[in-house]
Image: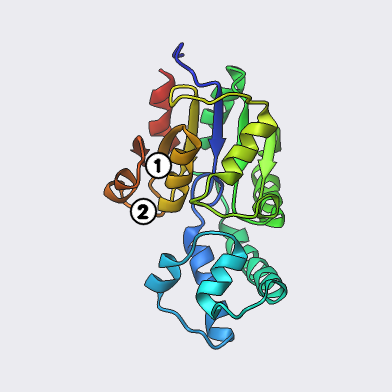
Amino acid sequence: MSSLLPKYVLFDMDGTLIDNYEFHVKAWGQMCSKYGAPRHRSEIIRDLHGTNFEICQKYFGPGITFEQSEVMSQEKEVLYRELYAPHITPICGLIPFLDALRQAEVPMGLGTMGTSENAQFVLDALDLHEYFAVLKTAESVTKGKPDPEIFMSCLQGLGATEELSKEELWVFEDTTSGIQAAVRTGGAAFGILTSCDEKTLLNHGATRVFADYQKVMNLLL
């Protein structure tokens, strides 16, 4: 195993641990249609970043209140879990990669703009709790990605007390806003190709991109 291991590794969840992006798109599409704000798939994808309040403001208008967005978001997340539950599986090579990092005693954190319920849904279904020393969800922050708040919060929880280099911090993400958040955190932003193409992620600051974690394992050789 490489002697050039990072001090910390952070992961996004949706599209990074699991390939569930289309199920979120489908759930939001159904919500938009139900509440009189139908959107083309491309519009849903364009605005699908940030906190659920921020997303609801984009889909349903700036006049929506935080309380209204909370109710609608909870409904959407229940729908998403119902749609995705029969299909949930880790991205190829994820578990061996996590095992390798744990064996090397590299602390890992999970920072997702998904809800705590969604995070527990994934961690329970795939038995991933033991890998992550820190979990931060949408409820943990006030600003969504591309703001780095959630990743900085993860690092604080892991005990990082100084600025880290790209060699010391690896961040795995799948979206342009996630890659931007990773870059702003100061780490090497590694893209997983579930939601965007290679060129798009590289153009937004990704250090490298990978089809799955079988390819990522080469970083440890």
Specify whether 29 is left or right of 202: right
Q: Residue at x 55, y 79 (%)?
A: 60
The colour scheme is rainbow
Instruction: Identify the residue at image location x=69%, y=77%.
Output: 68
Horizontal and vertical percent position of residue 154 = 63, 37
Numbered disc 1: secondary structure: strand
- Above-or-below relation of 199 to 104: below
In this orientation, which residue lies closer to the viewer: 181 or 11? 181
Amino acid type at image mark 2: Cys
Depth order, front residue of 190/131: 190
Tags 1 and 2 touching, CB below 8 Å: yes
Pick whichever of labels 1 and 2 is earlier in the sequence. Answer: 1
Residue 12's place in the image compared with 108, above or below, is below
Image position of 19 (left or right of 157): left
Q: Position of residue 127 (x, y in %)?
A: 68, 40
The span from disc 1 to disc 2 (Cα, nearest Å) is 9 Å
Residue that label 1 marks: 191
Image quadrant in which you'd find residue 156: top right
**Does residue 111 appear left or right of residue 71 in this picture?**
left
Judging depth in this view, the residue of 43 and 194 nearest the camera is 43
Badge 2 is on which residue? 196
- Circle 2: is it few (<14), some (14-19), or many (20+) Cα within 10 Å? some
Q: Residue at x 45, y 67 (%)?
A: 47
Q: Secondary structure at mark 2?
A: loop
